[in-house]
Structure formats: C-alpha cells, structure tokens
Amino acid sequence: MTTSTPLLAVDELSVVFHRKGQGETRAVDGVSFTLEEGRVTGLVGESGCGKSVTSLALMGLLPDRGVKVGGSALIRLPDGEQDLLKVSQRRMRDLRGSQLAMIFQDPLSSLNPVVPIGVQVTEILSRHRGMRGAAARREAADLLQRVGIPDPTRRLGEYPHQLSGGMRQRALIAMAVACRPKLMIADEPTTALDVTIQAQILELLRDLVTEEGTALLMITHDLGVVAGLCDEINVLYAGKAVETAPRGPLFADPAHPYTVGLLGSIPRLDAPRGEPLTPVRGSVNDNIAWADGCAFAPRCDHYTMECLQGPPPLVGASGDEEGPGHIHRCVNPVGRAGPDRPEPETPAAASEEERG
Amino acid sequence: MSLLEIRDLKVHFPIRRGVVVDRTIGHVRAVDGVSLSVERGRTYGLVGESGCGKTTLGRAVLRLNEITHGEVRFDGRDLAGLDPESMRRERANLQMVFQDPLGSLNPRQNIGSILLEGLQTHGIGGPSEEEAEGLGRRQRRARTAQDQRRRVVAALERVGLSAKALQRYPHEFSGGQRQRIGIARALVLEPDLIICDEPVSALDVSIQAQVLNLLEELQEELGLTYLVIAHDLAVVRHVSDVVGVMYLGSLVEEATGDELYGTPAHPYTRSLMSAVPVPDPTVEDTRERILLAGDLPSPADPPPGCRFHTRCPWRQEERCDTERPELRPLHGVQGSGTHRVACHYAEQILSGQLRPSADQAERIVRGAG
Amino acid sequence: MPTTPSTNPSQVPLHQRRAAKVDRLAELMGERGDEGHGAGVWREALQRMRRSPMAITGAAIVALFVVVALLSEFIAPYGATSQTWGGEVFPNRNEFVGPRAENWLGLDHLGRDMFSRMVIGARQTLLVGVVATLVGFLFGALLGGAAGACSVLGGRWGRQVDNVVMRVIDMMLAMPTLLLAVTVAALVGPSLTTVMVAVGVAQIPIFARLLRGAMISQGSREYVLAAEALGVRRHRIALTHILPNSMGPVIVQSTLTLATAIIDAAALSYLGLGNPDASSPEWGTMLSEAQRFLSSAPSLAVYPALGIIITALGFTLLGEALREALDPKLRK
C-alpha cells in the first residue's frame, strides 16, 4: 500500500431516498473505499445492494429531489482536492468526461440514436479538449481504432443501431476514454453482452488500466468477472460493504457468510457435474434494518443474539497471513470457528419458502 | 429409445418485404440442420450465444415456431407431422419454463388460476371413471375442482411455496419465487419433458443457485427429462449430462459435460470456454483466453463452408471456407465415444499439430500471471 | 426441537437461546409486515389513485357533474322553459338580469333561470358524452379486438383479415367528425341522436386502433407464449390472456373520450346540429344562443362554457390519473 493519498477516497457514502407516503429507503448506508491509479476496485453485490446508486452518486447523476447524499468522496485533481459530492452542477459537468467517465450496462440507450457515432465522439473532443474539424475526426477515428473497432473511419458515419452490442459498448468506451479520464466507473459493462464479447471488453478495460493508468471502479454482480479483473473488492449487501479485501484473500478465505454464500451459488466451469451448489437461503427482501442488527441475519445460518443487537462493527479479519486490508462486518465470521461459533441452525424465521 | 429425438431440424423464418403484397426476399436460418437426442431421465444442455438459434430450437420442439424441415420424435411420435389440435393435446407431456419469470406469468391471473389453467385445458384430474358413474354432474365438477386444487397445491409445495400463494398475483412475489411458480406451472401437468429456456439468467446469483438446486431435486424425485437452454456454459455444465454447443443455427460440438470441459475439440467451444469467467483469481490469472475477432455473422446470410470460419483462429485455407463440416465422432480421444464435433481439423487442433494462424495469435492471451 | 450438543459454555439451554433469537429476528422483520394479499392490478391502481391529488380532483368534478345530471329535476329550482321573468329582460335594450337571490346565475335573454338551465343541461351533456363514448367503445373494441386477435393468433390468414379491417378503420379515421355529423343531420334532421352518433362514430377508429395495438403488443409477451405452450386453445388465449391485459389503455381512453365527446357535442350543438328542443337545453346549444348577446351579457356564454371546460377537465384529470396508476413503469 502506498502512503500517498488515493485518487478517490469515498468515505461513509450514504444515499437516502425519500418518497412521499412511503418513508425513506437507505439505498447506500455508509460505504467507504478508495481508488488508485492503475488499479481496479470492484463493487459486487446482487440487485438492490446499492452498487449502482453508489456510482450514480459519485457521478452526480442522482435526481435533485427526494434524495439525500451523505459522506464524502475526495478526488485528487490537478488543481487540488475536491469533494465530488459537494461540487456544483456546472463543475460536475466539466469533470464528467474530462476527469471522470462512466460506462453503462446498456450501450444502446446510452448513445443518442439519431446522431452518428463520429459526431458523438467529436462532440466530446471539442467540448473537453477543444479539438475541431479534421483534427477531431482523426482523433475520433484513432479512439475507435484503439478500442478495437475495425474500419473506424467508416464507422464514424454510422448510427448506433447499425453497430452490434459489443461494438456499441466499444464506442461507448471510446467516448469515455476520449479525454483520458483519471477515473472510470463501469456499471455492469458486460452484463448485456455475450461471453465471448464480454471477454473482449474486459480485455480492453484491463489494457486501459495498465497502459493509461486509469483508476477503474468496476460494478458488477458477477464474481467471475471480479476475480479476473479487480485488485480490491467490496462485497455489498443491503447498502453496506459487508466484506472488503484484495481479491486473493477474498476468494481464498472469505470471512462473511454472504460472500461465502455468493461463492457457493456460482456453478463453476471447472467443477465436475453434480458438485452441489450451496446458495444463500431466501432473497434480498428478507432483511432487517442495519440499525437493528445485521441485515443479513435472516438469511444467515450462523446468526446469534449478538447479530440482532445493533449494527455489526467493521473488523479486520483475524490472522495476519492474509495481509492488510481484509475487513468484514460479521460477528461470527466463517472459517474462524472458535468455541463461540454456534452450530449451524435452521431458523424458523420467515424464510422464502414459508413466506410464499 | 431416446425420449426426444431431433433429426435434421430446420427452422427458417421468411423475411418479408412489400407495400401491398408481402414478398419473401430471404430467410433467417435460425436453426439450420440440428440433430440431437435426449435420453429419458437425463438432462441435455444446449449452450450458445445470442442469435445461435437455441431458443428457436426449444420452441420448435413444442411447435411454438413452425418447423421448416426435419423430425421431432417425442416418445416415438413425430411432433412435426401432427395436426394443430393433436399437438395442442400433446403439450400436456412437454412443458416449458421461460426466461423472464415475471413476463411469462399473466399479471392479471392469480397464482391459483395460473396453475389451474393447464389442468383445466387438458381435463386432468377428477374422479376416476367408475367413481364418476354414480355422481351427478355438479358433484362430479366439484370433485374435479377439488382434485385439481390438490394437484396445484402439491406442485406449489414441491417447488417450495405454500398454498397461501394461490390468491396472490405474480407482482407480489420476488424473482426467484416467480420462477418457482413458472416451474410449478410446468410440473402440475406431470410432463415427461421440460424445456427450460434460460431458466436462471434473469435471476440474482444466489437465487440462481436455489432454482438450479430445485430443478435437480425435482429431476431426482420425479425422474424428469430436461432440455436446458442457456447462454451460460457454467450453468449448463452444472446441470447437464450431455452438452451441445450451438453456433449460428447448428451444433458444433456435443459431449458429456466432463468430456467437453476436459477436451473441448471445436475452436468455438474452446474460445467460449476460455471466455467464461471463473470465480477464482488463480485460475483467472493463469488460463489462456482466446479472444474471437468480430461479431456473429447474420443468420440471414450465413458464411459458406464452416459457419465459424470467419472468426476461427485455426482456420485453414480452402476447406474451411467451402466445405461445411458434419457433426461427426471425434477420433483419437479416450472417452465414452459419444463426443461429436463439427470441425474438419478437430484432431489436429487437439494434438497441437495445427497452430492458430499468425494474424490471430495475438488474440490468444495468457493470463497476466 | 432438535437437541444438538452445545459447545457454548453459557448456562442457558441451547433451545431457549435459539428460541429467543428466533423471536427477536421475527420481531425485527415483522415490522415491515407481509405485503400483498392478492391485490389485482385494478385494485392496486385504485389504491394508488387514492393518493393522487390529480385523481381526487378529477373524481370530485366528475362525481359532482354526475350527481347534478342525475338529480337535475330535484336540483333545478325552475323548469328549463319557464319564462317567469320574461318581463324583466329586454335584449334589444341590453337590459339583462344578473345573479340575484332567486336566480343564482341570473336570467337568459328570454327571462329563463340560467341556473336551472345549466343543471338540466348537465344531464343532456352527460347523456351525449356517455352514449357517444359507448358507441365508440363498443364498436371500436369489437373491430379492434377482432383485428388484434386475428393478427396475433390467426397466422398468415389472420394478418390478412387484420389488414383489411385496419384499412376500413383508416378510411373512417380520414372522415372528419363534422362532415359526418352534417351528413347524418342532413339525413335524419338535427337532433340529440345525430350528435351522439356523429361523435360516437368518430371515436370508433381511435378505440379500434388502440385496442388492436395493445393486443398486438401483449401478444408478443412471454405469458402468451407460455399459455400456448401449456396447450390453451387460441380463442381462450385471446379472451382470457390478451384481451384483459389490453383493456387498460382502452379504459383510460374512454375516460378521456368522455371529455372530448362533451366538447365535440357542444361544438355540434353550437353549429345547430343538436337538439332544437328548448325544453332540454344542452350546454353547446346554450353557448350558441348566448353568442348574440356576447357584448352585452357575456355571462350567458361564460356559464355554459365554464361548465364544458370544467367537466372536460374533470374527465381528463381522471383519465390521466388512471393512466398513471396503471402504468407498469410506476408499479413496483
């Protein structure tokens, strides 16, 4: 770990939605992580865990009304440090594209359908880098070439619907990297794509990070993608990071039962037929408020009375052999069976089956 | 005899254009000559990327798409030749589980009515003939309703839901529960074959695993036969006894899951396998990735010769471009002898005799290490 | 209760601790309650509308209008034609009588009570609106439903049938309401029926296109495929699956159509194609009569105009609120 300040330090980020007549929803509930140049940080979790809301909050893309954002996100810019959550709308627009870039899940809806790809790319170049005319077009073609779009000069004149899904995502990445942003947020960038195309896009992202030194925040539900790409991983559940670790320890020695459950849920290509899956019970709807205890308790096989008394603290994983940076939010972490760790039990509390 | 036997199945969709009268100007060859057989009590997994025709194939078995050519023998009868009414009745024995758990349930029907529909349509349930004799019409109807309800509740409980669900509507359930309802709908008819079209791809990871486990339990208990169609090779391998890999409307390789994983012979299978992420950093860092060039060609205008030659790293001059390879047994490999592949050079590629062409080699990436 | 040996040194027996924690968990989870008790789409929409100010305003206006129209005999203090105060009004000399204690809205140019005429006119207006909408709804839904069902389930032949029906509907759509009304009036003479038929027929193509479009879009949904895979007969799929799910926009449209029908009917009456019978005034007719005195007694025109506008607004608000409440994007 370097001692210098990270490129982006997100501290206790929280996002609360207020809806009329429905009270408030804590979509993100105190998430902290850091991003460094040339490294990939992953946010992993299932739907509703708050991973996408986190990215929208960082990009300043949440609606103005009915949302309360708390915490801080300090970014190191050429002209000093700034809190992304507090900058003005106008400044944010400048930062987006020049310093920050975002890639979304659905490339078709992120591109303007009635404007040719070339115009959309040159627009960014002229806005943020002041390039015009032939120079901008040349640079745009170069960018498309870089992200692996064959025959880029012809493609510049094409409309989004003329490109395939993979090509669209490449075009979007080209637009994202047009201004050599320091920080890139990719929200499920390959979920809508086929596996072979996914492999191409992941390879492209990997190259960008190593060659340009971009810091990448990778948001995904797929632990397989994370295993191949991310340096540092945060597993989110119900708006909180339940486990944070470098990828080695996370996969080799997961501490939080939710991480273990997720890993046990994925059929592995290299496992023989019939190897049982050991998924988490229930669904994300079966949770309790973090203020009351561990939100995961209703789905956990090992919860105790202790889990139901206030929010569980963030603790370092025991055993130094894992190196620093492995922390989790569990009172009875997996694989640390001491005399206190209770036997697995099947709680009678509302599990998915009984609620049906 | 196999429960389901598909022989040279073709499904071509006409492309129509025209102002007043539609003219057929071409065909999308969604499925273009597929032969496979599914053994009773086993699971056949069909894997492929979007546009490879796997969904069309699944629907064609149920005749939800018109079959252009070929045979679909189910339990000895050729479904392709049945008249619509007989086919409709036959559907009691072949059921389907759909990808989108919410979209495949009618939002205005409660669960009870969704599950009863199949029983009512096929007149399943009710008193036996001799029992029915002594009963009046109204009594008979009451007994039938009672029996059908019992079957519905049994199916619901089988998939892990309770009778409380009967009065509720699809939108009141979570994604996983909805998919369970979809499975119960198929199950209640006690079919011989269930076609699962992307049964878990719309679900969260942990819910996926629950549903996969449920499918396996049901197979063990009820001796069901599955045709599982999915884009996720890991899912297919997990549930299937035999895996078939589809590319652009045809099968390129077929083998038992373990053999396919151990010795993938077709270049497409190899690249597909290398692209599937494995949740294990050590594996991810060390294995080789074969990145395919370009995109899937249009099924309306498939390339001549081997369908895969436009993207194949091992492509050879002449033969690959002109001669379409048949699905044939793979030679020189130890195994059950059921491994089939549609590649002219599969053996040479396996033995390392053939190397990827120079311009494609850069697309084969070793892990960062 | 299973009795697994405990490794915990605590004194409390395991099963008691287990029961305690299960209770605690149930307590913490219980707060959110078990939502959903078989509420169908419509019931949910109603619940959502109860919270919408737009829906409440619209419903209040519509309810008031309907009550007034139904009970007009009891509400109207005087008859529609009673010229009790004929001697007090002199249109030639620009002498009109404004609002006063016994005539809340004043008198018209023939010395008739404006309030009573407005109240009685409400029933005529409602009648025209409802009948015209019903005509449009019934015939439109029939045509559109048939076309939609044929298109979705009829294969190639069905698509041809659909094609023919839709071209006929396009022709109807091409004919202006006014021209149609004038034609009908020329055939049977100006009457309320003329207005109702003319306005209603003009709505048929709108309903037909809407229902057909909704059915075709529902027809491509997976639950229809699922029903087919289940072996459900085609006519049953059309009736029990596609049709009920396609009715939402049509019902919303009929609320909105009520508003336009009222305006259209007023326009036709204004042009003199409406009911010439003075004993059953219609707001449009009243408006047309008041035109002559617009400079001297604008209020005679303002009252019926306001009536038309507010009623149309009420139906529009209700329709829009219904559309919003039924919108699947807003449903959780």
Image (spheres, coloured by chain):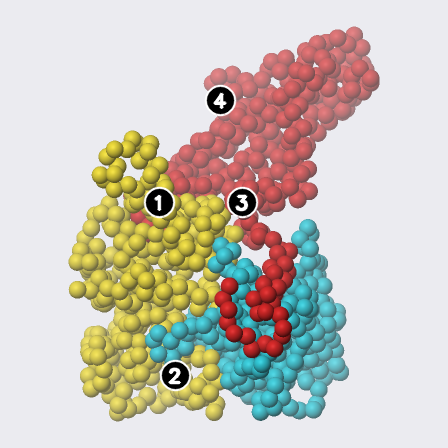
Chain colours: A cyan, B yellow, C red
Mark 4, mark 2: which one is toward the viewer?
2
The structure residue drawn at horizontal position 53% and vertical position 25%, both measured from the top left corner, is C131
> Is label 3 in contact with label 4 (beta carbons under 8 Å)?
no
Mark 1, mark 3: which one is toward the viewer?
1
- Marking on residue A295: none
Pointer 3 residue? C39
Callout 3 secondary element: loop
Mark 3, mark 4: which one is toward the viewer?
3
Q: In the image shown, does B29 or A267 lie closer to the viewer?
A: A267
> Is label 2 in contact with label 3 (beta carbons under 8 Å)?
no
Chain of residue at mark 1 = B
Pointer 1 residue? B148
Quadrant, the N terminus of chain B: bottom left
- Marking on residue C184: 4
Callout 1 secondary element: helix
- Does residue C150 appear to the left or right of A288 in the view shown? left
